Amino acid sequence: DAGITQSPRHKVTETGTPVTLRCHQTENHRYMYWYRQDPGHGLRLIHYSYGVKDTDKGEVSDGYSVSRSKTEDFLLTLESATSSQTSVYFCAISESTGAGNTIYFGEGSWLTVV
Amino acid sequence: AQSVTQPDIHITVSEGASLELRCNYSYGATPYLFWYVQSPGQGLQLLLKYFSGDTLVQGIKGFEAEFKRSQSSFNLRKPSVHWSDAAEYFCAVGGGRDDKIIFGKGTRLHILP
């Protein structure tokens, strides 16, 4: 258990409304990530963070923004949700050891935009 | 550029049969390699990882994987599958300084009774 909690776990929202997904970790990891998972596409990186207020874009960042004001929380915001953003969203952390870095995932947030 | 290819979208095997899931990668330096498993409606669970050393890596649930640098492959194997192994399996590669990991598109494993 990597101590990752995502909220909400399920959400239905209307097109054009803002949505914020929250990822909370309890183990003080430096790196945090947001991925989306869609059939036929696997997991695609949206944004990631390498420290408080330090974030960068992934491969599918358009339409998304993130914030990290505290080490333990990484927020993903859809400013104006669209149907193409219906997906499963996974938060992840990177655990560093002397040998390398390993990604661990939260349980996912199912988002439906109608 | 980094990439991961899982050539098989679906694989079906009989319970008790052996399993091999293929993974090929493209990476400019020494890769870190991973296999994850995802059951329906669940998150991804780490099965095993390779950083360095012995190229045959043992993981949880009786899985193993072998790193073959000459073939840029990291195939996942299990000698005898169980019905509970039915899931989707993801190969991933990473190791860069910026810590990003790239995933393949997954292989869905079906088990016949």
Image (cartoon, rainbow, N blue to C red):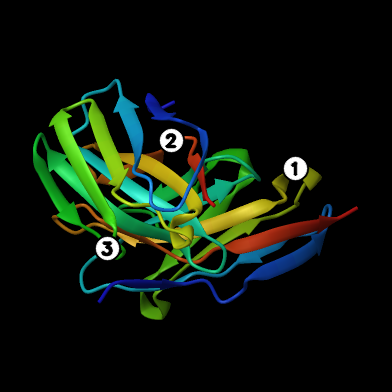
Q: Secondary structure at mark 1?
A: helix
Please state the horizontal and vertical placement of residue A111, each as a whole percent of the image: 50, 45
The answer to whether mark 2 and mark 1 are in CB contact below 8 A is no
Please state the horizontal and vertical placement of residue A77, each as a whole percent of the image: 29, 44
Residue drawn at x 70%, y 59% as measured from the top left: B109
**Residue B78 placement, left or right of A72:** right
- The chain letter under disc 2 is A
Numbered badge on residue A106: 2
Quarter-of-image position of residue A103: top left
Residue drawn at x 10%, y 34% as measured from the top left: A52
Numbered badge on residue B84: 1
Task: Name the residue carrying label 3.
Answer: A62
Distance between the Cα atoms at labels 2 and 3? 22 Å
Q: In the image shown, does A52 or B16 lie closer to the viewer?
A: A52
The N terminus of chain B lies in quadrant: bottom left
Give the foreground label among 2 and 3.
3
**Residue B101 placement, left or right of B110:** left
Give the foreground label among 2 and 1.
2
Residue drawn at x 80%, y 56% as measured from the top left: B111
Give the foreground label among 1 and 3.
3
The disc labelled 2 sits on which kind of residue? Gly
- The chain letter under disc 3 is A
Distance between the Cα atoms at labels 1 and 3? 38 Å
Q: Secondary structure at mark 2?
A: loop
The disc labelled 3 sits on which kind of residue? Asp
